[in-house]
Image (spheres, helix red, strand yellow):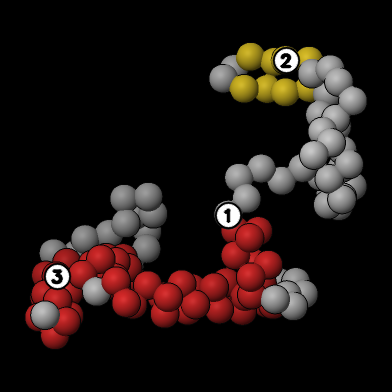
Amino acid sequence: IGIMAIGVCVVIFIIGVAMDRTDPANPGSPSWLYMILIAVTLAVAAIPEGIPLCVTISLSIGCSDMVKKHVLVRKLAAVETLGSASVICSDKTGTLTEGKMTMVNMYAGGVGYDVEGKGFDP
């Protein structure tokens, strides 16, 4: 079953490159790059045992990109945690703090809100 799934992924890749399918979100990217993403996604969906390998590879690529920008990464799990964050609060200098900041204004859905209170104490 695994060999057949990989064969189907290769066929999808070849057809996609032949049809010059590009990423709708980034039309300027090459079609082969987008089709590699599609083929790997299909392979992971067909063979779930490949998920840990794909996650590790993508985190490693992310770490190497961060190293090129001179970011110090000590633990791979820290990058994964930071990647799953949906909101990052920082002060006016751009530094991250220890979670002791208090929100005073908020803008959501086109409406501005004033927020009151002393903060969050878990």
> Element under label 1?
loop
In the image as oriented, which residue stretches furthest toward the front? 122
Is 79 rendered above or below residue 121? below
Whether 25 is drawn above or below 63: the answer is: above
* Number of numbered discs on residues: 3
The residue at 37%/50% (across/down) is 25
- Would you name the residue on which mark 3 appears? 12
Q: Name the N-terminal-most of marks 1 and 3.
A: 3
Label 1 environment density (alpha carbons within 10 Å; few <14, some 14–19, many ≥20)? few
In the image, residue 82 sits, relative to residue 57, either above or below, namely: above
Measured in 3D between alpha carbons, the distance from the residue under mark 3 to the one under mark 2, in whole angstroms, is 49 Å
115 to the left or right of 52: right
Callout in the foreground (1, 3): 1
Q: Nearer the viewer, residue 19 or 119?
A: 119
Image coordinates for residue 1, horizontal then vertical, percent: 11, 80
Ranked by sequence position, the earlier of labels 3 and 2 is 3
Q: Residue at the spot x=56%, y=20% of the render?
A: 109
Which picture quadrant has residue 107? top right
| Residue identifier under label 2 | 113
Between circles 2 and 1, the one closer to the viewer is 1
Q: Are marks 2 and 1 in contact (CB under 8 Å)?
A: no
Q: Is residue 31 visible?
A: no
Indicate which disc residue 84 carries: 1
Q: What is the crowding at mark 3: few (fewer than 14 residues within 10 Å), some, or many (at least 20)?
A: some
- Looking at the rendered structure, the kind of residue marked 1 is Ser
Out of 90 and 49, give the one closest to the viewer: 49
> Is 75 on the left-hand or right-hand side of 18?
right
Residue 77 spot, x, y in % from top left: 63, 70
Q: CA distance from mark 1 to mark 3?
A: 30 Å
| Secondary structure under the numbered disc 2 in the rendered image | strand
Of discs 3 and 2, which sits in the foreground?
2
Circle 3: residue type:
Ile
